[in-house]
Image (cartoon, coloured by chain):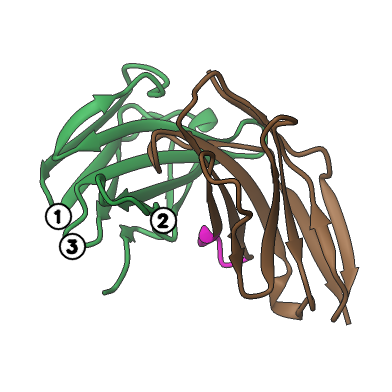
Chain colours: A brown, B green
């Protein structure tokens, strides 16, 4: 069984600033993957970034990067140079064996202030 | 590619009625998932197909729920009879299992309201 915990129900950031969203997980699998998904008001679930547990290097996608601490089972998302379009609900997720059967956290609502 | 296509976008029905949600996965994808999103329980996996075969339906809440995938380009999730507690957003997602960078792509969801 896997669990994913997001302890920050809401976060806010000033436009152009940097914000970090927290996520911890628990899994008994040795082969697993971690994801951050964004859900804007349109409801669409959009993949932001993906991290393979066997890789030590932190994943980066443009302004989005993660801090993956495997021993601590921590997987935080850093958004640099925040933009108004980044405002959304962000979900952390864990999957055993690639993208199958994601277990999601409860989400963090991010507000970007102009 | 048009992405994962779900229909309808919104569905309002009365308790006891049959509801059918539809999904067209991305062409070439061989895995399909149905998720349900509610405020109370968040996002939950209902069922997962691989090559049109149901692999894991342990998330299906009860016998009122059934899912089919008659071919690689179409899947349905049926609720019969529907109940108010089934009100939720239902997402379909697809992926190509086997790629080293396999990613899950979601549809826009169906907002179901059971009155």
- Establish if A46 lies above or below B35: below
Q: Residue at the spot x=26%, y=74% of the render?
A: B1
Looking at the picture, how far across and down is residue A63, in whole percent? 68, 74
Which residue is labeled 2 in the image? B106
Residue reaching furthest front? A56
Helix, strand or loop at disc 3?
loop
Q: Are marks 3 and 1 in contact (CB under 8 Å)?
A: yes
Foreground: B55 or A99? A99
Helix, strand or loop at disc 1?
loop
Looking at the picture, how far across and down is residue A99, in whole percent? 40, 43
Quarter of the image for the C terminus of chain A: give it: bottom right
Q: Which mark is residue B73?
A: 1
Looking at the picture, how far across and down is residue A94, in whole percent? 54, 37
Which residue is labeled 3 in the image? B27
Looking at the picture, how far across and down is residue A67, in whole percent? 72, 51
Q: Residue at the spot x=44%, y=55% of the render?
A: B109
Residue A78 is covered by the magenta coloring: no
Q: Which residues are magenta?
A: A41-48
């Amino acid at each position: 069984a896997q669990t994913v915990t997001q302890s920050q129900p809401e976060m806010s950031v000033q436009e152009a600033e940097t914000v970090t969203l927290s996520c911890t997980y628990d899994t008994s699998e040795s082969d697993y993957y971690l994801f951050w998904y964004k859900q804007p008001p349109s409801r669409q679930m959009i993949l932001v970034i993906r991290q393979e547990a066997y890789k030590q290097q932190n994943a980066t996608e443009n302004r989005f990067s993660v801090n993956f601490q495997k021993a601590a089972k921590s997987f935080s998302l850093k958004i640099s140079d925040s933009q108004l379009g980044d405002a959304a609900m962000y979900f952390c997720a864990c999957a055993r064996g690639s993208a199958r059967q994601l277990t999601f956290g409860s989400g963090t609502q991010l507000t970007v202030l102009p | 590619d048009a992405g994962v296509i779900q229909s309808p976008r919104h569905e309002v029905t009365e308790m006891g009625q049959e509801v059918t949600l539809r999904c067209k996965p991305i062409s070439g994808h061989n895995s399909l998932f149905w998720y349900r999103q509610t405020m109370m329980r968040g996002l939950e996996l209902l069922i997962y197909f691989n090559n049109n075969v149901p692999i894991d339906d342990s998330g299906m809440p009860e016998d009122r729920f059934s899912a089919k995938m008659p071919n690689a380009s179409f899947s349905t999730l049926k609720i019969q009879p529907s109940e108010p507690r089934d009100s939720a957003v239902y997402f379909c997602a697809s992926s190509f299992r086997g790629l080293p960078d396999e990613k899950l792509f979601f549809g826009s969801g169906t907002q179901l309201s059971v009155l």
